Amino acid sequence: MPFRKHMDSSRPKILLVDDNPGNLRILAETLRHDYTIVVARDGETALQLARESNPPDVILLDVMMPGMDGFEVCLRLKSDPITWSIPVLFVTALAETEAEVRGLTVGAVDFITKPIVPRLVKARVRSQVELKRHKDHLEELVEQRTREIAITQEATIHALASLAETRDPETGGHIRRTQHYVRILASVLQRHPRFRDTLTDTMVDMLFKSAPLHDMGKVGIPDQILLKPGKLTAEEFERMKDHTLLGYKTLEAAQRSLGSTSFLHLASEIAFTHHEKWDGAGYPRGLAGDAIPISGRLMALADVFDALISCRVYKSAFSHPEAERIIRENRNTHFDPDVVDAFNARVEDFRQTALDFADPETDPSR
């Protein structure tokens, strides 16, 4: 059974692992004035203590123990994402070079040779504790900076999407619904062999964040076309098509300023390709099949479905069953068949999303 001494959460925590009570006593006496000491007399207990919510800062580990020896304990610690970063110092009577090489191979950072020299033990432990605290501080700074970048990205996208809303009063609810539709579809396709390498969790998150900018280019369409209370003429429709190119150019210019790996890459891709069709009959480039980025294929279905169930000045809203039938009828023509299959698998989630983000004075439960 483990025992603990001087439990003070403000002090660095050292886990001592040795099957010999005498060795544990010597190490604990050497370190107890500067550190919180936790001890274990076998490998299994050591692994359990290392996985606690308040893990040790450093582990001093005996090599020669019955059952699971120190090398195996260290190997398991370094194979576990929860404990891999805890520095391990072997405490051993083994003086052979082969043992030291094996210890370093399984992940130990240092060796302390028996019989123990207290001043040397203190110096080695202090060095590892300071190094661990410094590394942890750097990781905290990186996490903080990552959070700040994520907030900046979301604020930028929100600002740009809000700009698009000012030109088209029907855009707000559409933006929120379609971004959720895209995430629903992507989450299904994450398990599909064609997409699982592309649709990582990070990719799905960025698709969700970028989707609101799919109609960014409409800010460049004249009001008499964008807000026309009726069907567009053929010439007006050709002008309306330009919103894909306008959105792409705007976002691409911003992306060039931020770098090729910026978060706006997906947004510009979606803006440019969400009106392409699986059979090549779409615009602006007439891409077909897998030549259309998956981001554009997902957005295409989300955009069309929401347009179908929404009331516009030039048309009445379709019922959900009617909209769903149209989506299915366009499988393998307008839409990637696998994307339609994902839609079929989660059609009830589409309906609920339409309810959750319904425009005022509409009834999306039809």
Image (cartoon, rainbow, N blue to C red):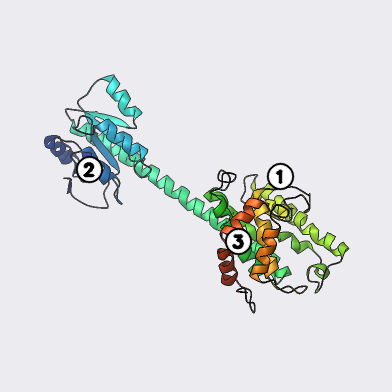
- Residue drawn at 57 percent across, 50 percent down: 203
Spot occupied by residue 292 in the image (x, y as percentages of width and height): 70, 48
| Secondary structure of residue under mark 3 | helix
Q: Kindly state the secondary structure of the residue where label 1 is placed.
A: helix
Q: Which mark is residue 181?
A: 3
* The image quarter in which residue 42 lies: top left
Whether residue 208 is visible: no
**The N terminus lies in quadrant:** top left
Find disc 2 in the rendering and name its residue.
45
- Give the Cα distance between marks 1 and 3: 22 Å
Which mark sits nearer the N-terminus, 1 or 3? 3
Q: Amino acid at mark 3?
A: Tyr
**Viewer-nearest residue: 27 or 286:** 286
Q: Position of residue 356 (x, y in %)?
A: 56, 71
| Mark 2: amino acid | Thr
Q: Earlier in the sequence, mark 3 or mark 2?
A: 2
**Amino acid under label 1?**
Ala
Q: CA distance from mark 1 to mark 2?
A: 55 Å
